[in-house]
Image (spheres, rainbow, N blue to C red):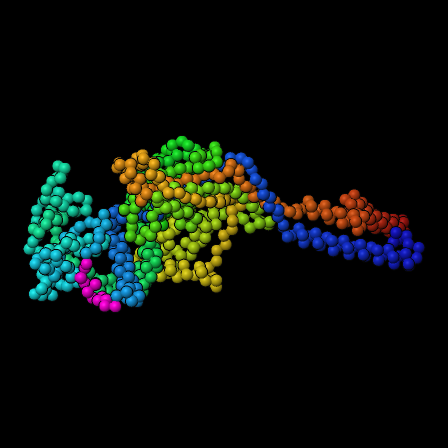
Amino acid sequence: MLGQAPNIIYKSVWILLLTGCLCMFILQAASLLIKYQRMDKITDIQLKFDTAPFPAITLCNLNPYMHSLVQDVEKIRVILSVYKDAMNNAARLNDKSGGKNEDYDEEEETTTQKRTKRSDNSNFEPALSVCSCEDNEDCLANTTAIPEEITHDSTMCICSFDRESEDTWPCYSQEDWYNTTCQCNEHSYCSKESKDGGDTNTQCLCQNNDPFCVGHEHEKPLLQLWEYFGRRNSKEWADLVNALGFDGLTDEVAIVTKAKENIIFAMGELAEDMRRNVSIQKHELIQKCSFNGKPCDIENDFKIILDPTFGNCFTFNHNKSELKSSIRAGPMYGLRVLMYIAADDYLPTTEAVGIRMTIHDKDDFPFPDTFGYSAPTGYISSFGMNMKAMSRLSAPYGDCIPDGKTDSYIYEDYAYSTEGCYRTCFQDMVIDQCGCGDPRFPVLGNASHCFVFNQTQRECLEQRTKDLGNIHSSFKCRCQQPCKQKVFTVSYSEAIWPSQSLNITLGTCKLEPDECNEHYQENGAMIEVFYEALNFEVLSESEAYGIIKMMADLGGQLGLWSGISVITCCEFVCLFFELMYMVLMHHYTAYKRRLWEQSRNEPW
């Protein structure tokens, strides 16, 4: 129409019309491209009424290691000794600052040991000390006085000493003790008379004032309390306190936290088999179990996992090739477990009594210290759960990772997770800068964990940990969510357990029913994990504006503003080739004509 316009007015109108349509098309096309480049996505939520797969359940004792077993580990004994001393110092300082005892005599309290109640796990040991006695009876030990400081009102005596509580009683004059043979129990408490036909051939020390005896090999020298307690005033002891991080701590909660960390460091230096042996065993922790109303096979259904914080943990439904599902909703058709935690063998650093429970997908590491739930003893703890299956889009639409595991991922046998990624990133940085790994996380290859008494390594690790909370730190980890993930939401309720009417023998209790009930209120816990409803949510992401929709919209804009379709574009392509062909043929024909004219003008 522009070419056939009869005058300038028609041409001007068509030029303006074509220019306006072209501008509108460019604006609309740019808007479509911007919309496409946003890579918007749609989250589709579906509620599926189907049986959801049962997750893996990991159960741990809140007490990581048995107190009676870790006493054989020298570094643990040292840590517990320093910990007890730090707690006593904090208690004295807090009592003085609180004004509870204005006439407080610190020297008398630290040197003269008063009688206190011992635990059932106390181990007796004879020890020499300077004592003050009344009529050679009821002697009181002065644990820091040396034999050269004996005065007219003091004498050398032998006391029954317990390293755990540091109690020194009873004490009697050294002349009142004599070597003999006795029948002794596991705590070295002995009797000269045989009970129940037991063996009385164990070497022991007895005294003449009462029938109290303590086991002791006659050739073995006696412990000297002035040396045992005197070392705390030495530079070596001060360096030890500083290396363990107790120096300057006066808050009991902070002291307990630091002691737990030190135990993790000390146990990290041991072989894995040794750590498993000093923690609670599978059949000790798990007494009874049922799933879907049927008994479990405790030996095969539970897999041991060694956790640095909680020791031996046990995972139900660990087999990835076996699919377990609840046939109905409710606690009767989920997992029900009777747990026995042996509270009388807890470490002095364990603050709570109970169970740590984690619900997770069987492909994921449980992380009980981060994602776990605590259940107390003396209660039946019910955990009702719901599952959400999430499917995310990877780049360019999202920021998830289809498979984020790398060769340095420290949880080799488990799938990628965000928490595992952060721990791997931090562990790599610590190994690179400190030369050792954080004992709270695994290490790979030839790397080793930091040593508990190595102050340089401990300070380096502590500084790296502080850097995590500094927003200006150069340490940055990029850990995205996995593209496929199952998330479990949990609701919790509890009831007192066992009831007084439950007059049956539970677990390994061999007492009377009433006594068993009382015993399990202190040492037992029932755990129920079940689906609240036989349905689950599926959250899936899909692209909101893809290439197909963009091409359709772009074609619509072309048709609206220019009347162009795919056929029109093909016609323009054909026209272009025809024009090129005509141009070439024109030049070729002209060239042939020149040649013909030249040949015609040449003379014969």
Asked if one can make out residue 1 in the rendered structure from this viewpoint, the answer is yes
Asked if one can make out residue 273 in the rendered structure from this viewpoint, the answer is no
Q: Is residue 111 above or below residue 525?
A: below
Q: Seen in the image, is 427 located left or right of residue 208?
A: right
In front of the other: 366 or 503: 503
Percent coordinates x, y for residue 557 in the rendering: 76, 49
State the extent of the magenta-drawn residues as a range: 102-114
Q: Is residue 218 above or below residue 136?
A: above
Q: Residue furthest front?
A: 501
In front of the other: 215 or 210: 210
Q: Quadrant of residue 24?
A: bottom right
Q: Residue furthest right?
A: 6
Q: Seen in the image, is 300 located left or right of residue 235?
A: right
Residue at figure coordinates x 81%, y 57% from the top left: 19
Percent coordinates x, y for residue 6 in the rendering: 93, 55
Residue at figure coordinates x 43%, y 33% from the top left: 292
Residue at figure coordinates x 57%, y 46% from the top left: 393
Q: Is residue 136 above or below residue 534?
A: below
| Magenta highlight on residue 227 | no
Percent coordinates x, y for residue 67 in the rendering: 27, 48
